Image: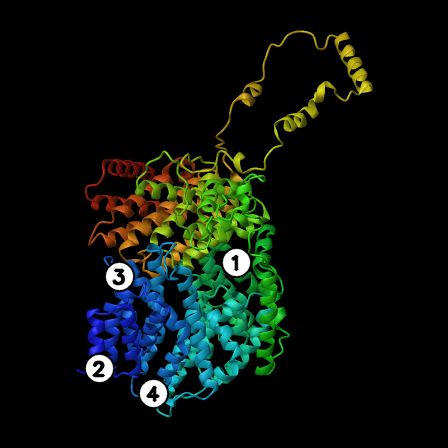
Amino acid sequence: MSSLESVLDQLKRLDFSTLELQTALNTVSAYSPLSDSDNLHLSLILLERVIPQAYILASNDIRKAIIELLATPIGINQLLRSIKEAASDETTKSEKVYSYVDILSHILEHKLEFVIDLFLNCKGTHNNNWRVFLTMKLTDVLGQVHLWLFDHPPNSDFVLNVNRMRVRQLMEFYTGNCVKCLAARIEQCNLRSDKTDTVQQILIFFLEKEPEAVFNMIIENWKILNSFFKQENGNSLKGKSKAIENKKRFMMGLFKAFNLKITDYTSGKLYSSLINNMLKTFDLVDASELILKSCEANTNYIASYAWIHNTGRVKKEHVLRILSNFGNQEYMSCTSYNLQIATAQYIVILLLHLCDEDIHKVSTSKQFLDTVSNRLESKLVKLRDLGMFIADFIYTKLNDKEMFNIPDYSKRKALFMSPLMELQKEFADVEFKSIDDVVCTIRSYRSITLVQSEETQLVDEKPLMVDIRCDSDASDSDLDDPSVERKVHVTKPVFLKDLLHYLLSDPQKDKTAFEKRGIAFSIGIEMVRIKKGMPELTFYITRLIDAALDMDSTGFPLRSNNKLTDNEVDSAFNSWKLSFMIALCTSDFENAIDYLLKMFLKQDWSISTRIKVLTCIGLSCRELSGKHDDFIWGKGDLQKVKPKNLRGPGHEAFLRLDSKELNGRGIVDVALEEREKKMIDALEAVGIGEGKVVRRSRKLELDKQDNTKNNTVHTTFINKKLSKLYFSMVALWEDVNILTHGTGFNVGSMSEHLNSHYVNMLSMIYSCAVPSCTVLVDMSIEQIKILIGVSKSIQTISCTEFPSLLYEALVNGVKSLLMGNDRMFSVLKSNAPVEINTLFESFAQVSAMAPSMEEHTKMLSVSVLEHLRQYCLGY
């Protein structure tokens, strides 16, 4: 047996002391580079035997040696496999995964250039394996670990620095450095000819995944990468075909990046010059068709204009095809309103690039006339308007006068058309510079933008207050004794910045973290509520939401005489967290809801977190619309976080100032008293003021009552904010159903939980609008469509197993539609008779399919179905 084999056998048997382990690892390192078989053998021994037993307790030298030995293609592949298997197995100890993640973090942070050089220098036919390894495999594992750590956070005193924040930063670091390393190797011409296609695909992968971040690196190396993507990848037909495909994907990746970068007319004109140069450089035959197709569903109309402005003349046939789809009845009923607005803007932009002759042909085409007719027949004003805007634009273009001259309509049309007309004027004087000048200008513009955004942030991120002081007697001689530990005292936070600091305090780094978090838990909800309407809350709202979602129960205060189980403690903590988030949403509704919905789409939250966020949104709407829920914490006593009064005697004296009782001496106005006395005498002389009280105002009695619950309906919130939120959530639900063919969110075994909760929250928000919302008709029609879709989804899913949770959500949804809504149904008789009949039929079919269930649900479904049948009898 060779020396290497004996050392590997010793490692496998775990027959060593700490010193012997260090010696064994050094011995193996001396044999580097190892053969593939020895490398695989070593990797398996380290990952399955040594690391689970020794890594956490090992010294830094031993950890460093292990990381060095695993920093090979085979070692990293086996490490990724081990992480994936360990994170998927619930029986695996968390410490094992923490060790693997720590090793991967060190490799990506310190050995990435070495790994990329191995890829670029390797020979053979393994390019595709390397591409998968550097892109999908690594990013998938990092994403899986990030989710896994949400449910398996390490203890605060854990020795390894493994947490979700580090993994998130590692994902960003890996993407950026991988692109930077590849760009540097391209610039140095250290790239084999057979690697061109693979490197192009790797760069495209990262550009499609993180368009904005990767574009910043591309613009720094624009000349290099632009020339790199011009290469033909060989003279073969297959190589040229791959090169064209890569150019298209690269251009579409830049399309996504430009959508994020173009935010105003200035940036639009700037990137328009870059688009112009890029299209000339790539010289793709079907570039115009590709761009027009991408712009169809683009909500950034400035970016769409910049692309179309540089593609040349728009074809009339393309405009007619878009118009035909825009006027389709199914498109109008199934597509979200925001997407329909984007399509209408896109049509106007296309028409702006048509000549007058083609516009005249469009105006007489069957597609255009059918579109306008179908739009005018719509029962919803906002859908009719979109058709009228386009028809009016074409008519004005041909006849120099408006088709519809209605005051209210003209205002709505001006709001829609003004930005597009202004856009045309702005782009009329765009100067197309050389590519070098354009790139330099973009770099300068980006630097200015970054400086401006940084100036809007607070510079000092430390807490504003001194949070630790000593509670002791100044005359105590023990203060001079260093062996006596001082008692620390944490002060109550005054500003939200301090509250955020307390919530995020780390017990591993701050010895007063438990006290800080305890105070934050005690007054956090009330403190947020009294800050309602203040700029301070607007500034910190997103960070407070993130802190609430990510925090654990460390320092959660409980009464000392309470003996609660772990489940009861978790339940209390979750109630506090939900109440805290509701306080944030009700105190700054628009900013909080916008951020939550945005993160609901972008953030990799767990299903339980998404359900918690939806619950928070629904209950916040109930509170703001005037409904009262007793189980929400922190709505009553806000006095404990308000500023303190003066001390007792001083406060009483201050109050007596107004009643002239300070020290028994008031400030007497003799002239005023004389005038009052004369007035009273004059009134009594004519008989006014005599007699007895025969009636006592009821208001006097009501004022004495303790009116602690205020159930006033807040119509301003319902009409302006609630309806907007409802339609936004409906649009999101429709977009998801388009992607999943009507089955809602597709998240594996938890799909039914998330879908049922989403439908329940939509029903809760809808019920808050009944009966006082001004757009209740539109909301009711949308609610009916959603419930019809849920019924069809249940019929599809129930072939395998009946979705009882989704069925309960359907029953609750129909119930919210019927309760207190008699007037609305009389209106819906004329506006949506087909939809109501369809809902009744589909709901009846689903109810007939439902298996035996709880008595309450069964009775409720029967009652709801009967009420719905009675409403449908008149049709």
Return the residue at label 2.
Answer: 3
Circle 1 crowding by C-alpha within 10 Å: few under 14, some 14–19, many from 20 = many
Q: Quadrant of the N terminus?
A: bottom left
Question: Are the residues at dot 2 and dot 4 in contact (C-beta closer than 8 Å)?
Answer: no
Q: Which image quarter: residue 246?
A: bottom left
Q: Amino acid at mark 4?
A: Lys
Return the residue at label 4.
Answer: 238
Q: Amino acid at mark 3?
A: Ser
Q: Residue at x 33, y 51 (%)?
A: 754
Q: Indicate which label's residue lies in the foreground, 1 or 4.
A: 4
Question: Quick one: which residue is furthest to the right in this view?
Answer: 671
Determine the CA span between mark 2 and mark 4: 50 Å
Residue 869, percent across and down? 30, 39
Mark earlier in primary sequence (2, 4) = 2
Q: Give the camera-side residue of 852 and 502.
A: 502
Return the residue at label 3.
Answer: 88
**Left or right: 95 in relation to 434:** left
Mark earlier in primary sequence (3, 2) = 2
Looking at the rendered structure, the secondary structure element under dot 4 is: helix
Residue 731, percent across and down? 42, 55
Determine the CA span between mark 1 and mark 4: 49 Å
Residue 423, percent across and down? 60, 67
Mark earlier in primary sequence (1, 4) = 4
| Mark number, residue 388 | 1
